[in-house]
Image: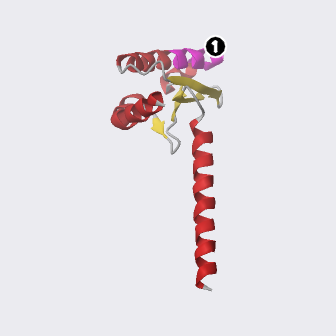
Amino acid sequence: MLGLIYYLRFILKNKKILREEYNINIDRFFRMWTVVNVPVNKHHNLKTYGYALLDFEIKEYITKLDDFFIRKSVMEIIALKDLHREDSLNALIIIEYKKFNLSNFFFWFYSIMGVSLLTGLIIFLIKII
């Protein structure tokens, strides 16, 4: 549980740095995501190298990002959850808290809150009538 609090605090403190220096977006489930692109000046090498060019860009980006995470002491609590190649030029990278899936946690949290509010509203309306 302390790891989750540390993770959330890291996200909130470093949101600006992550966005400006690493082009990382934070979604409502506190997952970090970005799209890695092959630079335009390297498109002419695409026919020669194919996916290897995108793989090189991904490895270079993740190495740079790992250095930042190591400096901030959060490598133990985060994990690369998904790496999806959109096409030969773009890849989606999703990073989140390592111990459990935050999107499932927030889905159930919001579902329970919604049901609770709806139940409370129904009980309130029944008492009025």
Question: Which residue: 43% across, 35% down?
Answer: 8
Examine the residues drawn in magenta and state their main secondary structure: helix
Q: In which quarter of the image is residue 79?
A: top right
Left or right of residue 115, residue 28 in this image: left
Q: Does the magenta stretch include residue 55?
A: yes
Residue that lies at the very extreme toward the front in this rendered image? 127
Specify the amino acid type for callout 1.
Thr
Judging depth in this view, the residue of 109 and 103 nearest the camera is: 109
Left or right of residue 15, residue 56 in this image: right
Left or right of residue 52, residue 23 in this image: left
Q: Mark 1 points at which residue?
A: 48
Q: Quadrant of residue 115?
A: bottom right
> Is residue 52 depicted above or below 99 in this figure?
above
Q: Does the magenta stretch include residue 27?
A: no
> Is residue 78 depicted above or below 59 in this figure?
below
- Residue 60: x, y in percent? 48, 15
- Residue 76: x, y in percent? 48, 18
Q: Give the range drawn in magenta.
A: 45-59
Secondary element type, mark 1: helix
Question: Which residue: 51% across, 45% down?
Answer: 28
